[in-house]
Image (cartoon, rainbow, N blue to C red):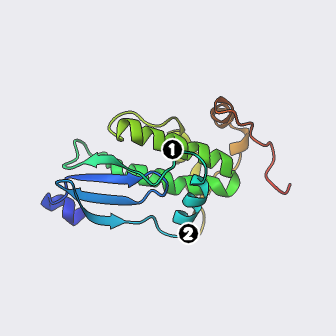
């Protein structure tokens, strides 16, 4: 993708709100598609079942040339991938985060600000394990910010992991 950007062939990027798929456009015409890899794409589709905001609609997330060094299209896609990490521990909380990200993209085109869940989709909560796979850090259930985020959205976090 970077080769296209350097030559100035692409004029914008869009992200699909239910899967995190990216498509790149040249003067409004779709030119390149990048699907979210499996199994994340299937996980995202399962999480998207229900909420209206997580629909198969495309929304702008970058205009080229980028106005800064912030690659908003890659940042947004990263949030979708990191929501899958949360889904392994708490699918309902992951869905709330995805709704937050989708609303942010749909209303602000990733042009300014951040979604409220961005902290939870960052290295403060997600890290690579010994094999390089992303995992949630221990102790996230005791974090007041996570509990407050969930409570503001009408969800009371379970105090223990499923099966305990």
Query: Residue visible at 54% across and 45% down?
Result: 52
Q: How many marks?
A: 2
Q: Examine the image and state in which quarter residue 131 appears.
A: bottom right
Residue at image mark 1: 53
Query: Residue visible at 58% across and 46% down?
Result: 51
Q: Which of the pair 137/22 is nearer the observer?
A: 22
Task: Give the label, 2 or 1, closer to the camera.
Answer: 1
Mark pair 2, 1: CA separation: 22 Å
Secondary structure at badge 1 equals: loop
**Where in the figure is residue 156, as x and y percent of width and height?**
75, 36
Mark 1 surroundings within 10 Å by alpha-carbon count, few (fewer than 14), some (14 through 19), many (20 or more)? some
Q: Quadrant of the N terminus?
A: bottom left
Which labelled disc corresponds to residue 42? Answer: none
Q: Examine the image and state in which quarter residue 16 appears.
A: bottom left
Q: Which of the pair 138/158 is nearer the observer?
A: 158
Work out whether mark 2 precedes mark 1 in sequence or the reverse, and give the earlier one.
2
**Where in the figure is residue 140, as x and y percent of width and height?**
68, 44
Query: Residue visible at 37% across and 36% down?
Result: 108
Query: Residue visible at 80% across and 42% down?
Result: 159
Q: Is residue 67 above or below residue 42?
A: above
Return the residue found at the far right. 164
Secondary structure at badge 2 equals: loop
Q: Is residue 32 above or below residue 47?
A: below
Mark 2 surroundings within 10 Å by alpha-carbon count, few (fewer than 14), some (14 through 19), many (20 or more)? few
**Where in the figure is residue 59, as x and y percent of width and height?**
36, 47
Left or right, 122 with reference to 68 = right
Left or right, 7 with reference to 93 = left
Left or right, 117 with reference to 113 = right
Q: Quadrant of the C terminus?
A: bottom right
Residue at image mark 2: 39
């Amino acid at each position: 993708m970077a080769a296209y950007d350097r030559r100035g062939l692409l004029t914008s990027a869009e992200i699909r709100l239910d899967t995190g798929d990216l498509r790149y456009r040249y003067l409004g015409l779709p030119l390149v598609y990048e699907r979210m890899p499996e199994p994340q794409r299937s996980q995202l589709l399962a999480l998207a079942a229900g909420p209206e905001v997580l629909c198969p609609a495309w929304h702008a997330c970058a205009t080229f040339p980028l106005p800064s060094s912030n690659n908003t299209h890659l940042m947004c896609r990263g949030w979708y991938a990191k929501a899958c990490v949360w889904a392994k521990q708490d699918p309902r909380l992951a869905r709330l985060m995805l709704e937050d990200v989708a609303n942010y993209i749909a209303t602000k085109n990733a042009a300014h600000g951040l979604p409220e869940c961005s902290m939870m989709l960052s290295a403060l909560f997600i890290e690579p394990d010994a094999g390089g796979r992303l995992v949630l850090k221990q102790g996230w259930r005791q974090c007041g910010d996570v509990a407050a985020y969930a409570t503001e959205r009408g969800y009371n976090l379970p105090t223990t992991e499923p099966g305990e």
